């Protein structure tokens, strides 16, 4: 089914459609290619101007503004002929605001005329994309720059106190109850991802949402977020598709769209996703708010991002928030681009919002006093009037406390933390109050300026600055009657581990004893959160002591590498229902990936190695008594100067996959692992039928009996290349040749897919055997294609049966005699069953 999507983004043609900072258009063509150009040619995209709500009226043009054009002629001289009527109005306004330096020194007409027109086009965009136009931007900048120079405290006259909110212990009874309420509310929620940033600060050249959140499955952040929303959508059971809006920027828009298209929108319908492209604002060079020119291009105004507060303006201009409210949605949830743990706490926050009828709820974490993170604070006037619950930056909170209620300033209480919770910019807003507020304000958020002065006179800047806004400052525009609160999860590891610092910065923070917020800890904290979640709700036995290792100068505990996909368990209550108490035991270096909505673990499941289980929707899988004992995967620290991918370099390790048991179910049905085993023929393997049977399928099809195969570690890329180059016929041919060659006891048996299918057919015809402990099906490289994450709309119809086997016999002592040809072929035939079972 072809999907259609509405994409909103900013381009220069905005003036033609009423001065909006973006264009709305509909994709009318079908997408079948897996890659697209990074840039979009908007000239080939049909505009639907009627779909564009007027975010603000165009600047009112009066005779007093149009008439005085002498200033334009006086400054631009002969170049004035290049200006259209609307250009003359805009240039005249700029000249009245003291911006003549933008045009002074222009060469005579006929020289660089295209560059002059390019600058005029840019000025029109800057004028159109700012609420009130570029003149309003300059006036606001002058006011804020003067306040900054004078050292005015924006919270002067306010008295701080701890706001109303919920403080929860992860996995506590209260948490589980609120999570259950939030799960019901999630079926009536829209989601907004603020993702305007590149990964350059991290040492990653791509967009941050394309960065794999962990190395076990290599799922990018955007894929994880979409999978989380789809899991909540499936649990809602109301048939409603939950919408996702993504705020992009000039730097990320094209690449975000490309990432979505290449991955088939990660299983979401195309028209569920809306991209909102943010425009930039002009930079300023001094306290008079003179606009800055690019040092290398005198015909270009220097610009920088305005801040993520623009997301509110974009939702207002696009009419998207209003559409959500009209469609019956109740909430809108905002989250950042590289916090993989956010959805673990978001449901509880939704439950808190619903229970308290909050207009705005900030997800928060405990913070140490004076820690460099904003604090959720309630501010009131001395008489208790004008209450405001807002984020206060850490460098403002301490002096505010000292000047009002605490001579000690920001200090820890008996809990060891500041009583003011830490803001992490994950918000839940109630649409019924949010939409009217957007209509009243246009989504404009209170701005601030943060110039870096050269000296104490505060007259000149070290570099250009600009006005900024933050999405968490939305409450400043709310009436005093609005209900604003917070939800704090006491255990930081359960909800917050962003990836925002480079390896060097992270190492420095580690030495200072501060959270590193790096790609290293961002990944390892996913495994930690999954392990501790299993321990909390299912009594899973974790290894003690844990492994400890150092990556990129950060020494940390390393938990078993457990990945629980959103499809498997989007909530703790579901995790508790699916994993029987005490049913899983994990070795220190084990790997466990569970991905599928209907997988349950009854156990005992013992993992000493790597186990990957994936099942599509409709495949019900029960994991029973099973022991996985293979060489597994190794998170190997990178040597200094070692050549590696950007993703590995910023983490400080690479993953060496030596052996993996893959259980993949890509056809609906009911399966038990290990299933009642089928007896293999007792005679020589020569008696096994050689005719290729039909693929094993059908409900309850039992897994194949597989001999344990140990494979020496090889580089991932080479192993994948080798696997792709060998056809089944080539493997059979090599097998026939090898049959006549002596084989050592500890040499892995080569197997053919044809032989394996024959064994499966013979096994299916035999009576069931008692379940036995499963051995491993080894993989010399990364996951097979079948074992990689499912994209719901691209699932094949064939069944990939699970692999199970009796334990492999102990290796014979060195120097022992070789096996007989018959026994070798029998072992190869058993192992071939695995190849047939996993061929998809």
Image (cartoon, rainbow, N blue to C red):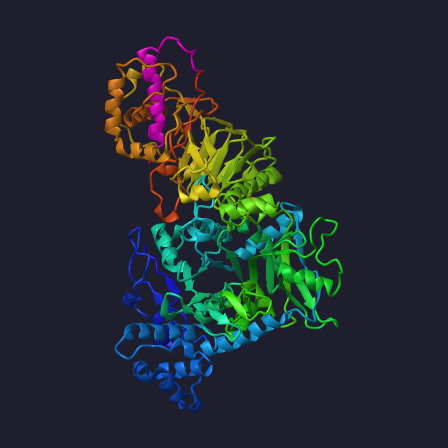
From the viewer's perspective, tell me whether residue 820 is left or right of residue 291: left
Q: Magenta stretch containing residue 827, yes or no?
A: yes
Q: Quadrant of the N terminus?
A: bottom left
From the viewer's perspective, tell me whether residue 418 is left or right of residue 690: right
Task: Please tell me in which quadrant of the rendered image residue 159 appears.
Answer: bottom right
Q: Quadrant of the C terminus?
A: top left
Q: Nearer the viewer, residue 728 or 34?
A: 34
Q: Position of residue 610 (x, y in %)?
A: 46, 31
| Total residue callouts | 0
The answer to whether 157 is drawn above or below residue 334 in the figure is below
For the stretch drawn in magenta, what is the main secondary structure?
helix
Q: Position of residue 639 (x, y in %)?
A: 45, 35
Q: Position of residue 77 (x, y in %)?
A: 33, 84
Question: Which stretch did the figure color magenta?
Answer: 811-838
Task: Please tell me in which quadrant of the rendered image residue 250 appears.
Answer: bottom left
Q: Position of residue 21 (x, y in %)?
A: 41, 71
Q: Magenta stretch containing residue 16, yes or no?
A: no
Is residue 617 in sight in this rendering?
no
Is residue 835 in sight in this rendering?
yes
């Amino acid at each position: 089914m072809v999907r259609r999507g509405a994409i909103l983004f900013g381009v220069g043609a905005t003036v033609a459609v009423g001065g909006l900072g973006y264009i709305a258009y509909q994709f009318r063509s079908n997408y079948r290619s897996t890659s697209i150009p990074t840039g979009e040619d908007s000239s080939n995209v049909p505009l639907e101007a009627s779909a564009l709500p007027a975010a603000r009226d165009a600047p009112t043009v009066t005779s007093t503004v149009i008439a005085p054009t002498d200033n334009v002629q006086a400054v631009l001289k002969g170049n004035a002929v290049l200006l259209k009527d609307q250009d003359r109005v805009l240039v005249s306004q700029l000249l009245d605001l003291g911006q003549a330096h933008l045009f002074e020194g222009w060469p005579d007409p006929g020289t660089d005329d295209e560059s002059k027109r390019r600058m005029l086009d840019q000025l029109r965009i800057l004028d159109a994309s700012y609420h009130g136009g570029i003149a309003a931007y300059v006036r606001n900048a002058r006011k804020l720059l003067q306040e900054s120079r004078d050292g005015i405290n924006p919270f002067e006259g306010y008295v701080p106190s701890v706001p109303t909110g919920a403080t929860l212990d992860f996995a506590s009874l209260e948490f589980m109850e609120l999570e259950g309420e939030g799960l019901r509310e999630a079926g009536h929620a829209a989601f907004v991802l603020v993702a305007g940033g590149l990964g350059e600060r991290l040492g990653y050249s791509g967009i941050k949402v394309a960065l794999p959140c962990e190395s076990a499955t290599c799922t990018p952040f955007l894929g994880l977020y979409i999978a989380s929303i789809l899991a909540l959508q499936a649990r809602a059971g109301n048939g409603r598709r939950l919408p996702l809006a993504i705020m992009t920027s000039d730097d990320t828009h094209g690449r975000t769209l490309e990432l979505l298209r290449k991955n088939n929108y990660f299983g979401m319908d195309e028209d569920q996703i809306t991209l909102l492209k943010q425009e930039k604002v002009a930079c300023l060079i001094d306290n008079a708010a003179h606009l800055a020119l690019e040092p290398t291009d005198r015909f270009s105004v220097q610009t920088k991002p305005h801040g993520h507060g623009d997301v509110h303006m974009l939702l207002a201009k696009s009419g998207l928030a209003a559409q959500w409210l009209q469609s019956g949605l109740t909430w809108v949830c905002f989250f950042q681009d590289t916090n993989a743990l956010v959805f673990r706490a978001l449901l509880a926050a939704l439950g808190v919002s619903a229970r308290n009828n909050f207009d705005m709820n900030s997800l928060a974490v405990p913070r140490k006093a004076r820690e460099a993170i904003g604090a959720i604070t309630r501010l009131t006037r001395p008489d208790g009037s004008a209450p405001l619950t807002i984020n206060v930056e850490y460098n403002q909170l301490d002096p505010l406390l000292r000047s009002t209620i605490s001579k000690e300033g920001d200090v820890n209480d008996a809990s060891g933390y500041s009583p003011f919770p830490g803001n992490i910019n994950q918000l839940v807003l109630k649409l019924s109050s949010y939409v009217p507020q957007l209509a009243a304000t246009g989504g404009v958020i209170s701005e601030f300026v943060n110039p870096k002065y050269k000296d104490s006179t505060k007259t000149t800047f070290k570099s250009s600055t600009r006005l900024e806004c933050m999405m968490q400052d939305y409450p400043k525009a709310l009436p005093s009657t609005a209900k604003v609160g917070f939800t704090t999860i006491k255990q930081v590891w359960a909800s917050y581990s962003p990836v925002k610092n480079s390896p060097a910065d992270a190492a420095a923070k580690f030495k200072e004893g501060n959270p590193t917020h790096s790609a290293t800890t961002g990944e390892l904290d996913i495994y930690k959160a999954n392990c501790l979640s299993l321990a909390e709700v299912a009594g899973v036995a974790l290894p003690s002591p844990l492994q400890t290792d150092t990556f990129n100068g950060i020494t940390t505990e390393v938990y078993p590498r457990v990945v629980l996909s959103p499809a498997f368990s989007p909530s703790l209550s579901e995790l508790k229902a699916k994993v029987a108490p005490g049913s899983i035991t994990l070795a220190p270096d084990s790997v466990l990936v569970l991905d599928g909505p209907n997988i349950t673990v009854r156990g005992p499941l013992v993992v000493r190695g790597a186990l990957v289980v994936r099942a599509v929707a409709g495949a019900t899988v029960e994991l029973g008594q099973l022991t996985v004992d293979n060489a597994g995967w190794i998170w190997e620290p990178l040597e200094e100067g070692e050549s590696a991918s950007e993703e590995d370099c910023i983490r400080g390790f690479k993953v060496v996959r030596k052996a993996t048991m893959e259980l993949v179910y890509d056809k609906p049905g009911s399966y038990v692992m290990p299933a009642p085993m089928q007896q293999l023929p007792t005679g020589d393997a020569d008696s096994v039928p050689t005719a290729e049977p039909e693929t094993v399928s059908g409900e309850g099809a039992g897994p194949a009996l597989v001999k344990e195969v140990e494979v020496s570690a090889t580089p991932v890329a080479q192993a994948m290349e080798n696997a792709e180059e060998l056809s089944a016929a080539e493997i059979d041919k090599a097998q026939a040749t090898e049959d006549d060659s002596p084989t050592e006891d500890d040499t892995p048996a080569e197997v053919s897919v044809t032989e394996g299918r024959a064994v499966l057919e013979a096994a299916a015809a035999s009576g069931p055997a008692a379940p036995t402990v499963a051995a491993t099906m080894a993989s010399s490289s990364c996951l097979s294609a079948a074992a990689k994450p499912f994209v719901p709309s691209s699932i094949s119809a064939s069944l990939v049966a699970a692999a199970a086997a009796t334990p492999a016999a102990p290796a014979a002592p060195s120097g022992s005699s070789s096996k007989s040809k018959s026994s070798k072929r029998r072992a190869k035939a058993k192992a071939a069953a695995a190849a047939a079972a996993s061929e998809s």
